[in-house]
Amino acid sequence: MEKRILIADDSSVARLVVKRCAEVVGLDGEFEEAEDGQSALLKAAGADIIFIDLNMPKMHGRDVLRALRGSGNQVPIIVVSSAVNQSVSDDLLSLGATAVLRKPFSPASMSEVMERLEMSP
Amino acid sequence: MSVDEVLNQKVQEAMEEFAFISTVATDDEASSYNGPVAMVELHAPVEGQFILCAPKELLQELVDFAGGGMLDSDSWDAQKDMLAEVANLIAGQIQSAYEAEVTIGLPVVDENASVECALRRFETESTSFWAAVKDAKSAEHAA
């Protein structure tokens, strides 16, 4: 069955970059996009993997992550943000993020994460 | 490391890593700029306002690269989104250079802004752009 991949970022450029990168590393499926945190939360149900930015309107990515994990959603959630240092990364992982990708990232970095999740082609 | 030094380093790194655009921080400063500008409020650990002033030639180049031909680089909508994303990227990197909780605002973009503050000039192979952290209050934690 085709994977449903949700990309949540308020920037259309950033969503496109994540999508292109995902395609480069062989992550095929149906891509869905969310332009803010609230929309991400609504669209998360049924997603097989979620890429989420932190700094988004309406709801911060960290709050989306907390809400999803709090509701029992266990799908891989990859946080994609430039505003990430070690303490932020540790905090996100403790909240249940599966991985943290620091922008800008390379296809190789995403590929490493996909291999870890056993989602490589 | 001072906020200015972090700014210079992070602007160059972001342009190189995001779009493979080699960028040099010059010693030139401008006191005003008119044109496309993105502003991002910095809350913690550095307080202030990150300002990125980018001419349309640079935005077109960035859209062409990141969009991989899927975006119209002449479109202001695509350029505006790119300017916001690059400003967000650099602002995030400036804040995350300090080992502390990071908080930044959402980028605000104006196609024809008029900015008055000390702006550092950065040079690429094809053009120049300007950036600054206005009203910076240094972080307590050194980078």
Image: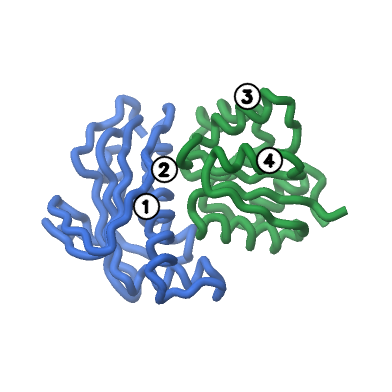
Q: Label 2 is found on which chain of the structure?
A: B
Chain letter for the green colouring in the rendering: A
Q: Gap in Å between the C-alphas at discs 1 and 2?
A: 8 Å
Secondary structure at numbered mark 4: loop
Judging by the rendered image, the residue that carries numbered circle 1 is B87
Which amino acid, mark 1? Ala
The image shows residue A86 at horizontal and vertical percentages of: 52, 32
Q: Label 1 is found on which chain of the structure?
A: B
Secondary structure at numbered mark 2: helix
Q: Gap in Å between the C-alphas at discs 4 and 2?
A: 25 Å
Judging by the rendered image, the residue that carries numbered circle 3 is A94
Judging by the rendered image, the residue that carries numbered circle 2 is B92
Which amino acid, mark 4? Ala
Give the class, few, some or many, for how many residues have Cα within 10 Å of label 2's Cα (few <14, many ≥20).
many
Q: Gap in Å between the C-alphas at discs 4 and 3?
A: 20 Å
In the rendered image, the quadrant that contains the N terminus of chain B is top left
The image shows residue A109 at horizontal and vertical percentages of: 64, 51
Secondary structure at numbered mark 3: helix
Q: Nearer the viewer, mark 4 or mark 3?
A: 4
Hue used for the chain lettered B: blue
Specify the label residue A20 is tagged with.
none
The image shows residue B39 at horizontal and vertical percentages of: 29, 49
Whether the residues at callouts 2 and 3 have beta carbons within 8 Å, the answer is no
Q: Earlier in the sequence, mark 4 or mark 3?
A: 4
Q: Label 4 is found on which chain of the structure?
A: A
Specify the label residue A44 is tagged with.
4
Instruction: Report whether mark 3 lies on the same chain as mark 1.
Output: no
The image shows residue A83 at horizontal and vertical percentages of: 46, 40
Which amino acid, mark 2? Gly
